[in-house]
Image (cartoon, rainbow, N blue to C red):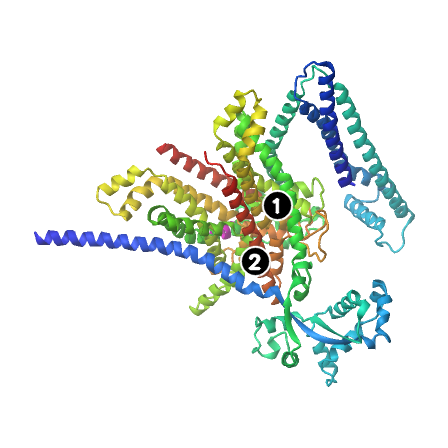
Amino acid sequence: MGFILISLIVLIGFTSYFLGSLRAKKLRTSNQKNLTSLNHYYGYYVALWAVVPALLILLMITSFKSFFIEQYVLSDFIALGSYTETELSLLFTQIENTALGIKLFDENTILIDDAVNKLNYINKTIENLTYVTVLGLSGLLVLYSLININYKLNSRKIVEKFLLVLYFTCSLVAIMTTVGIIFSLLYETLRFFSQVPITDFLFGLNWSPQRVFVRDAGDLDTRDLANAFGAVPLFAGTFLIALIAMCVSVPVGLLTAIYMSEYASPKVRDWAKPIIEILAGIPTVVYGFFAALTVAPLVRDIGQGAGLTVSSESALAAGFVMGIMIIPFISSLSDDVIKSVPQSLREGSYAMGATKRETIVKVLLPAALPGIVGSFLLAVSRAIGETMIVVMAAGLNAKLTANPLDAATTITTQIVVILIGDQEFDSPKTQSAFALGLTLFVVTLALNFIALQVVKKYTERYD
Amino acid sequence: MTDRIEQRINSLNKRLNSEKRFRIYCIGAMSFALAWVLILFLNIFSSGYSAFYRTVIQVDVPFLNLIEDTTQFSEMSSEDINNLSMYSFSKKAIYGLFPDIEEKKDKKMLIRLFSIEFEQEIREFLKSNKSNINETETIYLTASDDVDQVSKGNYPRDLDEDKRRIKDIQLLFFDDLVDRGLVSYEFNLPFLMRGDSREPELAGVGGSIVGSLFTILVVLILSFPIGIFAAIYLEEFASKNRVTDFIEININNLAAVPSIVFGLLGLGIILNTFGLPRSTPLVGGIVLSLMTLPTIIIATRASLRAVPPSIREGALAVGATKMQAVMHHVVPVAMPGALTGTIIGLAQALGETAPLLLIGMVAFVVDVPQTPLDASASLPVQVYLWSESAERGYVEKTSATIMMLLGFLILMNLAAVLIRRKFETKW
């Protein structure tokens, strides 16, 4: 239904654009008086009246209709008063399926039959009503705006004002997204912390949410809750894997950046830089597959050859592959920063007889240090928020360990493990994932903020 | 005197040597990074290319045993053919490959050389060729995953019998079929067309390609206009005040938020509060567009900023309003940059997995989705799903899916580069 209706509205929009411009043209030629705006602005003016309110109404109807339909169809069942909310919504799904012809009940009771009929009836009615309202409104407004066109109406101003408001609203989407993120995370997190004390979450040493089987949230043993949601092993695992990743990417990234900016000929640079940046463009799920299928077995074989016990999902493998992924983040940003150190510093150093290495290590790097540190911080925040590599290649069981050959789990992994598949909402287990998400959000935001401040400070110094 | 000179020379040599060493470290680091690009691609390619062809076994099917006169098929509707009982007939046709075997166990093993849908394949052949079916037709039937992997050499034959999935007797059958020239390869079109399946030899990426396309389409429809409009407002119209500052901080922060947090947003708000349908490209697209927006806005703003003020001022000088100057003169000039940013943002969205896991786009979907409101998987999620499966056949399928995903990404990035090269104006 939606598609046809929207096409109709668009069609009306186009027609009314021509009607509007035509009417303006006629007014102009018939009375020899000048209109305030160009003809096509009157077209836009009419078209806006035709389309915008109709679409808004349509949006409102579609967002509220499912609630209304459910209330109407289930009214008999609600009147009985013996159903809980979840049972009601389940019942509604069953009724919907029955209406589609899928047999769910062995024997349909009169109530169900009745409800199915009601559903069909209300669906039809609402559909018809929507058509009438939306198209009627659109048509009326076209008429209204056409009549409204006269010598005094400055349609250009109105159209431009509308565009400006539209642009402004679009730029608000960013704010709304942030608000949405904070709201959804906070809401569930607060509900989680009303059941599990925040100190247990932040300092507890044992993470095993699968132990908490929740049927009715009321009957939970509080001791069980306290012991199941200690996030320290996750923080430790995240830290460990990020550390391994940084151990790989910092030296490689930094040295690559130095080579690119100081040693490489322009030709080498033109080739090598994009190739290394490919690493940043490869989807993380590809790295995850690579880590799980190629690197992890390799690490295990090498470790076993050296007489070590290596878990098949070692933190080392995941961290190493993540390090490779991060290389371009460090190399690109550091490269830019090193290159933007003023030439005079380089030349001064050479003039004193310093070799290239001495210039780089003793002059350029200290000068570029804030920017380089900034790039490291950005890379760390990347590593902490990275999900797919650790989901596919690091362990799933939370265990407090500092051994890189052991399996370690991370914040992101646990979020995915908890929320993938069927979730029971309103259980502390599900809510704990949002608490983890909030932690992640806060940490990465703080890291980025610090990194940006550091970089900013640097740029001020040489401008 | 000579001592001091020697000392100097020694120290100079030391410095020059350390210079050389340092240079070698740098080159080493860069080669390390470059090598991993190569290793990654070679690794994926070498394990994935074999998914693009498949093993088929030639079987003579005596249709005369099914019906007295094969011309009668032409008068049957598809439904009639669907109602024909063909299971034991199809089995007998396969037994015909080795008429000598008597034991039930061996016969079962022979049947297992083929994909479980052999009956369906014969039926489909019958349906599409019903007007001219001869008494005996030669049909190429899909081999089972085990046979497929053995014939491609991906599966070790020399393991102990109880450790491998394919049994000795099956290998004997298979080798005999190879000697008789009945085993051949063909391009794996079903892999590109079909949806997911529990049987590796029948699983395809068609469903997830369509799912990805729908998702990207939703992202494009939502994030392109919103991103461009937001950028125009911020760059051209916004006065410097607290609201615009706040918007700007928000955009920069959103660009740095881990993707999984957007998944939580999708789950908490879009699914649970607004009640949009789970597992659908529509919801996936909405979540990914929120993620892509900062990229598009930042790129568009940069290219708007690069438009020289003379263009704006020229338009204003001949009497254009601010809005006309921007929309008629500045935005068209900045469009290539905005498009490039959009394509790069779309490429990111195409490769994103984590948020889709949380909004349920990991469902096992057999059918190819028809609209953005059908449950579906997407290419990266398909990679994740298959990489969790134990069967050997999924390894090559996963790699092949990655190859296609990378192919799409390369194409998109290439398009972005071309647009920039072709339309960008240097001032």
Residue linked to disc 1:
B263
Within the image, what quadrant is residue B81 found in? bottom right
Along the horizontal axis of the image, is B260 left or right of A51? left
The quarter of the image holding the N terminus of chain A is top right
Span colored in magenta? A235-239
Quarter where residue B251 is shown: top right
Q: Position of residue B167 (x, y in %)?
A: 64, 78
Please indicate, yes or no, whether residue B273 appears anywhere in the rendered image: yes
Dot 1 amino acid type: Gly
- Looking at the image, residue A422 sits to the left or right of residue A339; the answer is right
Q: Residue at x 38, y 32 (%)?
A: A460
Q: Amino acid at mark 2?
A: Met
Q: Residue at x 62, y 42 (%)?
A: B220
Secondary structure mostly seen in magenta is helix
Q: Is residue A238 magenta?
A: yes
Q: Residue furthest left?
A: B1
Q: In this view of the protein, which residue sits in the foreground, B344 or A436?
A: B344
Labels 1 and 2 in the same subunit: yes
Residue B371: image x %, image y %? 72, 48
Q: Nearer the viewer, residue A269 or B292?
A: A269
Residue lying farthest right?
A110
Which subunit holds the residue at mark 2? B
